[in-house]
Image (spheres, rainbow, N blue to C red):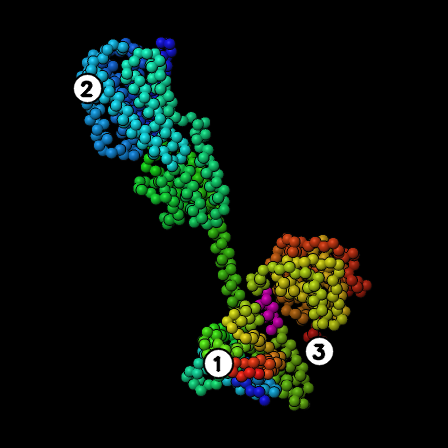
Amino acid sequence: MKTMNVLLVEDDADQRFFISTALSEVEGIEIRVAVVEDGQQALDYLHRRGAHRDADRPDLVLLDLKMPRRTGFEVLEEVRSHPELRTIPVSVLSSSERLEDVEESYRRGTNAYMRKRGFGEMARDLQAAMRFWACVASLPGRPA
Amino acid sequence: MERLVETVSDISSLLYVGLGLAAARLWWVRRDESSRWLAIGFGILAVGVGISLVAGPELPDPLVTVVILSLLAWPWVLARFASAFHPLPRWVLRTTDVVTAALAVWTISLGDLPEPGAPRSRALLAYTVVFIAHWLVISAIVAVRLWRAGRGEPTVSRRRMRSLAVAATLLGLALIGSGTGDQDPAVRLTVSLLSIASTIGFYLAFVPPSFIRSAWRVREEEALYRASVTLMDTASRDEVADVLLPHVRGVLGAEAAELLATDGTLVGRAGAPSGGTPRAVPLAGATLLVWRAAATPFWGTEEDRLLGRLAVLADLSLARADLLDREREARAEVEAVNDELETFVYSASHDLKTPLLALTGFLELLDKELRERPGAGERVPFYLDRMRSNTAYIEQLIADLLELSRVGRVDTAPEAVPLGELVADVAQDVEARHPGATVRAVGSLPVLWMNPTRARQLFTNVIENAAKYGGRDDVHVEVSASGGEVRVLDDGVGIPEEHHERVFRVFERLESGAPGTGIGLAVCRKIVSEVGGSIGFVPHTGGADLRISLPTKSGTAPSLVTDEGIEDDTQAPGADRPPTAGPRRDDRTSV
């Protein structure tokens, strides 16, 4: 079975629960989810700072946009400007339907933009997305 | 011949007396240093000439001395005059003082003068030579000064100064002629004619007739015209200053010009003033300062009038620039408020959406768990369904409100949108969502010129509305174009005429509990008005008849050109259905 390390960056507790639940229900792929609650924690995790000293490098980051301390845009900007982090695939997962937010996310280097929906729909979206990232796409350091 | 010489000489003398009066008048009007010296100079000259005119050829010796002294004073006064607007070197003035004083003493000590034509003594010859040389040198210096000072001046002022220069030179030449004492009538006639020519020059300098001024002003008139044309393109105070001030300098020959705001801040400047007090012209909310070039003895009503016309032009363009400024400010304010509102609506909708999304998620999870545990309660699935339906409704409401706030502000540039293709696409979607409903395009539809996303949103809304609120499942919708309008016709229950306007307002629905958020048609109207079009229902029996005018590809005017239309304008498709207004479908009352 394929395995994936996913870093989930989400400030809303309910959403963290839904997304984690949906990810745990994904079939055919073993997904290990690390969860952080804002953009600052995400950067600490990726840079392996403080409590995240022993953190694994994620195969995929699921990133919310509107968060306290550091927004998703800021995280994207920093990840994409860092020589070691810039190759990590990032998928924005936001409730915003604004075209500007979609465009801005891609401008700052996201690899995908997914919209949060009801639980059932989101679970189907994540099943498809995870299948794509784990089985279809070749990721840096681990060819498909 | 003798009579002719006498007559011409008398005319010349009369003209000099007149010049004395004209110079006095000029001083009376202007009261400045240069005109004072002119008045003194021509006054003395007029007195001398007047004496010889009145007394005739048989002049007693003391009077002859007075006449000669008056002629002697002329170059001295001329030097003062020239110095008044452009100082001559001190030594020139000092030398003039000394030579004039010496010549005056010499004149008085000359004693009896020989009769005209009689041989002259050596002393008298020497006196005559010094006298004429002094006169000529001073006249030449002043003439050159005047000629040069005219450069860059407005034409009228420049020509007046040059007339003065030429006249002073001619007067000098006339004096040489008379100084020779030659009694040849031809010489005397030439002297008189030169003298008359010089008076003409002086008159042109002092009181140029209006037709000559008009002819001289042509260049400035053209410059003014160019200035007014260019000023019409200016849109801000800075631009007005940039365009106007060089023209002010050019037209008036001013040394420098500045435009000051009411609070004294500098808006713009052309040229650099070398000192002196500027002429201040008050304008609408600004002041125009004009520094006259130091060498402008003839700034007069002419130049003031030009300045006045420039001031009117400046006033107009400043008023226009201010108006444009205020309009820009107002627009910026409105845009700022709109941006703020959009940010607010976005944040609010995001914050409202987040708990709703959670609610929906938990409802789904609850539903799933209950399904796995049968017998938890018969009514529970129904309650869950109602909760889901309500949360979905709030979600839609938020999405629609957000959309309404965004129409027209976050849209991209217009593109060509073939309405035929668009309607075919939308028809498929709507028919899929409303089984039984049929959507058809009739005749040729135009190519619209607008944002394609908004066009799709508009036609999806209006066609879906027709299918959704038709009062039954098998509603037929027809889209056609005629008479410069797009027409969306359905054979549903229609909309009572008194509600034709109301339905376009936010949250307005014809029946409480009807599906939808009541925002869709408001969004449609906003989309249409953003592109300068119009949308509205027209009275129709047996269905609803919606007319939309939109810009087409050929032009931005909200009109449509099509060669085919609906053949029967009054008969709705499927109008065989009785036109009774049945109740609208209501998903809440159906349970």
Relative to the observer, which residue lies in front, B32 or A62? A62
Crowding around mark 1 (Cα neighbors within 10 Å: few <14, some 14 to 19, many 20+) is some
Relative to the observer, which residue lies in front, B317 or B412? B412
Q: Residues under labels 2 and 1: Cα distance?
A: 114 Å
Image quadrant in which the C terminus of chain B is located? bottom right
Q: Chain of mark 3?
A: B
Residue A102 x %, y %: 55, 71
Q: Is residue B576 left or right of residue B350?
A: right
Range of residues picked out in magenta: B394-405
Q: Secondary structure at mark 2?
A: helix
Q: Nearer the viewer, mark 2 or mark 1?
A: 2
Q: What residue is at 28 percent from the left and 16 percent from the top? A: B180
Image quadrant in which the N terminus of chain B is located? top left
Specify the quadrant of the image occupied by residue B160. Answer: top left
On screen, residue B547 above or below B73: below
* Labelled disc at residue B591: 3
Q: Secondary structure at mark 3?
A: loop
* Labelled disc at residue B106: 2
Q: What residue is at 44 percent from the left and 83 percent from the top? A: A48
Q: Chain of mark 1?
A: A
| Residue beneath disc 1 | A37
